[in-house]
Image (cartoon, grey):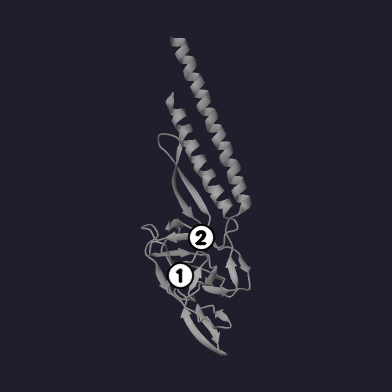
Amino acid sequence: MLGPIFSALTGLKNASQRLQNSANNVANVNTPGFKKSDVNSVELQSGGTRVNDISKSNTQGALIPTNNPLDLAIDGNGFFQVTNPNGGTSFTRSGSFKQDNAGNIVDASGNALVPAVNIPGNNTGISVDANGQISSQVGGQTEVAGQLQLANFQNPSGLQAAGGNLLNESAASGAPVAGNPGTGGLGTVRSGFLEGSNVDITEEIVDQIVSKVAFKANVNVIKANDELIGTILDIKS
């Protein structure tokens, strides 16, 4: 008698997690470099289902022109490296960079690019080539300010979300392997572009509809079994 209720409870939890995940994807549909999450479920031998894991989908997002030379998009594999508030290094596909008051290149939240790059304040122009070399115009001369490096992982889907569109290394992702853009399987850099989110809003709406229907169906199963158990107890009494 309790088997159907147990299965329905696992179904409720599964549907709830799918709805929460989809809501987070939809909320970030306009976040540069955001990678949607996918909920992966498995069937239980005892009946019902459970969420096995939630993984990142690393498909390429559309490249959106901005004409800002410090807006950078990765065309291919890899992640930008930035410092995080804990003093370590985090990874992101969001390439919305700027200069801070000291001339350092930082992301939208003020996290410094890794390796650090400083651009003179008296520059009259900044350029970033496809291989990540960052140059500035100072006094009519072109000066190399630094070299952008990307990092990649054996299993990028295993990276852990750290908030603020940042990802952290995990045991599942493996250790980062850094290099210049365009080398070692790393993508190239497109200056003046941002990579859009890879969230498909139509796909998310369909997933939400399916999850809501599954949630309602499992609630009805619990209600029906509760009424059945109540009827049996009334008969016995």
Say which quadrant the C terminus sits in. Answer: top left
Of residue 192 and residue 180, the one placed in the foreground of this image is: 192
Sequence-wise, the earlier of marks 2 and 1 is 2
Residue where numbered disc 1 is placed: 112
176 vs 119, nearest the viewer: 119
Circle 2 residues within 10 Å: few <14, some 14–19, many ≥20: some
Task: Give the mark count.
Answer: 2
16 lies above or below 220: below
Of the residues shown, which amino acid type is indicated by label 2?
A: Asn
What residue is rendered at 49% in x and 84% in y? 144
Q: Quadrant of the N terminus?
A: top left
Rate crowding at label 1 as few (under 14), some (14 to 19) or many (20 or more) other CA atoms within 10 Å. Answer: many
Residue at 54% x, 77% y is: 130
Q: Give the foreground label among 2 and 1.
A: 1
Mark 2 highlights which residue?
58
Left/right placement of residue 138 relative to residue 49 reads right
Farthest-out residue, bottom = 140
Vertical order, 140 against 2 (above or below): below
Residue at left 60%, top 64%? 62
Residue 4 disc label: none
